C-alpha cells in the first residue's frame, strides 16, 4: 500500500510556506504523493468550517513540481465540469510534461457544491452527464489521433493539442466520490477510484462492486483503489469503539491501516488537521 499526504492548500492556516514545507517534508519522508483539491470560490457551509483560502490546484502543483524531484503530484479531485475540456487537456498535458510525468489526476462531477457552479456559470444539474462526456473528449484529445469531437455539451473541431501528456496516453485518472455512480464512472472511463472516509468494511464491499462493474464494461485491467482519509488525530490514550478511523492512539491508527490493506486498498491520501 502506498501513502500520500494532502498538503494544506485550504483551511484557515493555508499559506505558501506551509504548503511548500509540507511538500518538501513529504518527499523527504518517502511519501509517494502529495495532494491538492479543486475549489475556485468558497461559500457556506465550507466557508465557516474550512476557511476562505483555497489555492488554485494547477498553479500550486506546477510550483510544487519545481520545488520537488520525485514525489507524485495528485489532484483530488478535478471538478471536470468547471473547465472546457480543451482548456483542461492543455493544463494537464503541460503539467505532466513539466513535472516529468508525475501527475495523478483525480476527476469528479463536483458533488453538491452548487454555489460554486453558480459562481462559475456552469449548469449544476447536468454535471454528471457533462463529466462523462468531457472525460471521453479529454481521452480523445490525449490519444494523439484526435479527429474532433461532436457531443451534446461540447463540440471541438479537429485541432492540434500538443504537447501531449508525458505519461501515455494520459496520467492515471482516478474517479473521486463514494457513490455507485462514481464507481460506474471509474469502471467505464478511468484507471482508478478515489473515495473518501470509508471504513474498511465499507471499502471492502465497495471494491467488490467496483470489480463487478469493471467486468460488466468488459475491462480486464485491475483498477487502482485509493482513499482520502479522515483528518488524522493522534491521542495519547486509545479511544473508544465509536471513534473515527485514523483517530486514536498510534497503535489504533496502525491497526486501521492494516485493515484497509486487507480490504484491498492500494493507496491512501492522509490528511492531518
Image (cartoon, rainbow, N blue to C red):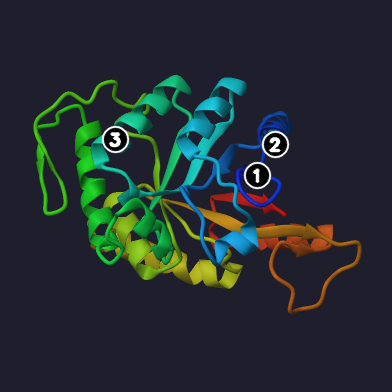
Left or right placement of residue 233 versus residue 167 in this view: right
Q: Residue at x 37, y 62 (%)?
A: 182
Q: Which mark is residue 8?
A: 1
SS at mark 2? Answer: helix
Horizontally, residue 154 falls left or right of residue 203, namely left
Question: Closer to the camera: disc 2 or disc 1?
Answer: 1
Q: Quadrant of residue 85?
A: top left
Mark 2 or mark 1: whose residue is earlier in sequence: 1
Q: Nearer the viewer, residue 177 or 252?
A: 177
| Label 2 crowd (10 A; few <14 / some 14-19 / many >=20) | some
Q: Are marks 2 and 1 in contact (CB under 8 Å)?
A: yes
* Mark 1, other Cα within 10 Å: few <14 / some 14–19 / many ≥20: many
Under circle 3, the secondary element is helix
Residue at 33% over, 66% down: 181
Give the label, 3 or 2, closer to the camera: 3
Q: Give above or below for 204 relative to 149.
A: below
- How busy is the neighbourhood of tag 3: few (under 14 within 10 Å), some, or many (20 plus)? few
Sequence-wise, the earlier of marks 3 and 1 is 1
Where in the figure is residue 163, as x and y percent of width and height? 29, 21
Give the answer, above or below, for where 65 lies relative to 54. above
Return the residue at label 2: 22
Residue at horizontal 86 percent and vertical 62 percent from the top? 235
Q: Residue at x 35, y 51 (%)?
A: 120
The numbered mark, 3 or 2, whose residue comes first in the sequence reads 2
Q: Which residue is mark 3?
A: 87
Amino acid at each position: 500500500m502506498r501513502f500520500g499526504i494532502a498538503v494544506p492548500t485550504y483551511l484557515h492556516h493555508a499559506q505558501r510556506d506551509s504548503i511548500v514545507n509540507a511538500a518538501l517534508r513529504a518527499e523527504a519522508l518517502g511519501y509517494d504523493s502529495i495532494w491538492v483539491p479543486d475549489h475556485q470560490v468558497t461559500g457556506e457551509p465550507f466557508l465557516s468550517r474550512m476557511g476562505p483560502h483555497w489555492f488554485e490546484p494547477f498553479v500550486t502543483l506546477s510550483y510544487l513540481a519545481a520545488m520537488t524531484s520525485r514525489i507524485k503530484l495528485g489532484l483530488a479531485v478535478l471538478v471536470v465540469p468547471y473547465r472546457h475540456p480543451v482548456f483542461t487537456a492543455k493544463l494537464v498535458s503541460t503539467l505532466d510534461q513539466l513535472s516529468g510525468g508525475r501527475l495523478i489526476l483525480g476527476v469528479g462531477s463536483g458533488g453538491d457544491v452548487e454555489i460554486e457552479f453558480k459562481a462559475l456559470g456552469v449548469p449544476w444539474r447536468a454535471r454528471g452527464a457533462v463529466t462523462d462526456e468531457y472525460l471521453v473528449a479529454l481521452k480523445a484529445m490525449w490519444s494523439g489521433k484526435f479527429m474532433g469531437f461532436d457531443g451534446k455539451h461540447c463540440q471541438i473541431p479537429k485541432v492540434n493539442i500538443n504537447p501531449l501528456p508525458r505519461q501515455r496516453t494520459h496520467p492515471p485518472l482516478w474517479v473521486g466520490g463514494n457513490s455507485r455512480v462514481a464507481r460506474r464512472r471509474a469502471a467505464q472511463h478511468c484507471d482508478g477510484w478515489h473515495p473518501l472516509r470509508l471504513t474498511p468494511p465499507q471499502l471492502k464491499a465497495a471494491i467488490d462492486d467496483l470489480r463487478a462493474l469493471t467486468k460488466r464494461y468488459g475491462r480486464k485491467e485491475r483498477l487502482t483503489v485509493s482513499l482520502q482519509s479522515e483528518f488524522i488525530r493522534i491521542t495519547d490514550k486509545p479511544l473508544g469503539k465509536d471513534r473515527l478511523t485514523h483517530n486514536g492512539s498510534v497503535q489504533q491508527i496502525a491497526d486501521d491501516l492494516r485493515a484497509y490493506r486487507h480490504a484491498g486498498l492500494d493507496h491512501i491520501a492522509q490528511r492531518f488537521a
